[in-house]
Image: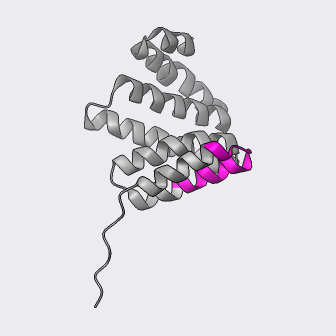
Amino acid sequence: MADILFARGDLDDALRIRREEELPVYERLGDLVGLCNVRFNLAQLRLAQGVTDQESAQDVMENLAEAYRLAEHLGHAEAIAAIGALFGQVLSQAGAQTEAVTVLARAASAHRKLGREAQAAEIDALIAALPQPPAEPTA
């Protein structure tokens, strides 16, 4: 149902269903794949709504971090590739460049494992375009 609402542009109701109906079911069942998917979907919904305040930005970051953690725990290359590509970009926008590079590099590696060289190359280009941290002063 949430997918249909999302497709129709009813983001608020789609978000409510994911958060209030789907998430508790996966938590109760201990379904890690389901939790990974619903967390990623929650983050995508919040991004589609537009991140306009600190609360929504924190919600996106928390859902992506948890989805990515679960994907890594499960060793699910498809999820690591998809979630990592988005999570790395969000981390970069939040100023966490070192962590962003780590996550993006893992996403590129997952794409390569899946035989998706074009997507991996796109992520490599994203990494190359990231602002570089300031050089440490030399003594």
> Residue furthest toward the left?
53
Task: Tell whether position 94 is magenta.
Answer: no
Quadrant position of residue 23 = top right
> Residue furthest toward the bottom?
139
Residue 95 shows up from this direction: yes
The residue at 42%/16% (across/down) is 11
Q: What stretch is highlighted in magenta?
A: 103-118
Residue 12 location in percent, x, y? 39, 15
The residue at 32%/74% (across/down) is 135
Task: Tell whether position 115 is magenta.
Answer: yes
Q: Name above or below for residue 81 compared with residue 35.
A: below
The residue at 32%/31% (across/down) is 51
Placement of the N terminus among the 4 image quadrants: top right
Q: Going by the image, does 109 lie left or right of 89?
A: right
Query: Which SS type dominates the magenta stretch?
Result: helix
Q: Name above or below for residue 79 compared with residue 100.
A: above
Q: Name above or below for residue 112 compared with residue 132.
A: above
The residue at 38%/36% (across/down) is 59
Q: Going by the image, does 15 lie left or right of 34?
A: left
Residue 73 shows up from this direction: no
Placement of the C terminus among the 4 image quadrants: bottom left
Residue 24 location in percent, x, y? 55, 27
Q: Going by the image, does 135 lie left or right of 112?
A: left
Q: Going by the image, does 119 lie left or right of 136?
A: right
Seen from the viewer's position, the closer of residues 133 and 52 is: 133
Residue 43 location in percent, x, y? 46, 32
Quadrant position of residue 138 = bottom left
